[in-house]
Image (cartoon, rainbow, N blue to C red):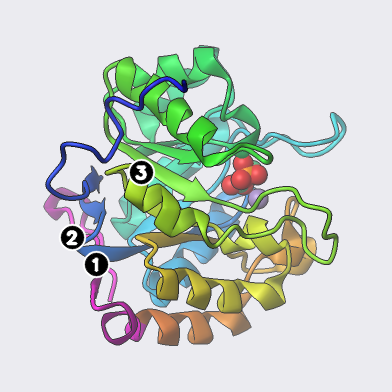
Amino acid sequence: MADPIELVGAHGRAGRSTVAVGGTAIGPGTFTLIAGPCAVESEEQMLRAAQMAVSAGASLLRGGAFKPRTSPYSFHGLGAEGLRILSDVRAATGVPFVTEVLDTRDVDLVADHADMLQIGARNMQNFALLRAVGTTRRPVLLKRGLSATIDEWLLAAEYVAAAGNEDIVLCERGIRTFENATRNTLDISAIPVAQKMTHLPVIVDPSHSGGRRDLVLPLSRAALAVGADGLIIECHPEPEVALCDGPQALGPEDIPELAALMKDVPRLAGRALARTPVPAEAGGRACQ
Ligand code: PEP
Ligand code: MN
């Protein structure tokens, strides 16, 4: 018999959980848009991407400072300099950010800067890393592994919770199948299935699912329709020169359509779009 999913399991809970993240929230009461570039490349690029994200309705920014790449010769991110840029952009915009941590040795550094720690698909079963982020007080965005079952994904979340941190958001980002028209196959049924099995919020990454810019809006609509708690979307001011994942990044011309979809969230999903309050001391501006 499979081990029980004790802490993150849905049993014994009256409702589903909301996870607070740097002034915004992810959970059943709202719909949360996270947006930004795959990788932080420069202060100017990150600021322009953040402005695109905010105008689309995002209340949380994304951007990788430490990037997991298939090839050792690809761009692996700016590291600590990327974290500094993300912090500066948060101060300028008032919008918190999520960023990936790849290595147990970097957990304290990333947690010192970030509002939320991302565990990428390739690290979903890096148990030492799961335990390490479980000892921080930062919420964790846990992506589903490329070939992980929903049980394995929830047990990975259980590692984080068992280490002391129950502020976890799950992210379906597409799984490996025989189909090669898309980078991965969005497992749309995983959202309602996981929501029945766990009290944790479940969001969708339509960017890595399809791997194609033209599929981001259709897959986002599907995520909204199926009851996801939010979206994480890649955008870039100049996707054609992006150092990572340019073909799936929304460009400036795509933002109005995403913004229109986000304005429609209350009608489509019966939830409010999550906002970021303006932190008084930062002089930042609120989303919309
Ligand atoms: C990312 O979010 O940029 C990323 C690397 O995602 P995943 O781990 O889902 O491939
Ligand atoms: Mn990416």
Q: Amino acid at mark 1?
A: Ala
Answer with left or right where residue 82 lies relative to residue 183.
left
Read off the residue under disc 2: 277
| Mark closest to the chain's N terminus, 2 or 3 | 3
Q: CA distance from mark 2 to mark 3?
A: 32 Å
Question: Viewer-nearest of labels 2 and 3?
Answer: 3
First to last magenta residue range: 263-288
Residue at x 16% of width, y 50% of height: 15
Q: Position of residue 242 (x, y in %)?
A: 73, 58
Q: CA distance from mark 1 to mark 3?
A: 34 Å
13 within the magenta span: no
Does the beta carbon at disc 2 come under 8 Å from ligand 1?
no
285 within the magenta span: yes
Answer with left or right where residue 205 lies relative to residue 230.
right
| Mark closest to the chain's N terminus, 2 or 1 | 2
Reply above or below: 145 against 213: above
Asked if disc 2 and disc 3 are in contact, CB closer than 8 Å, the reply is no
Element carrying mark 3? helix
Q: Is residue 40 visible?
A: no
Read off the residue under disc 3: 197
Residue at x 45% of width, y 67% of height: 53
Asked if disc 2 and disc 1 are in contact, CB closer than 8 Å, the reply is yes
Marking on residue 286: 1
| Mark closest to the chain's N terminus, 1 or 3 | 3
Near-viewer residue (203 or 132)? 203
Question: Viewer-nearest of labels 1 and 3?
Answer: 3
Near-viewer residue (257 or 265)? 265
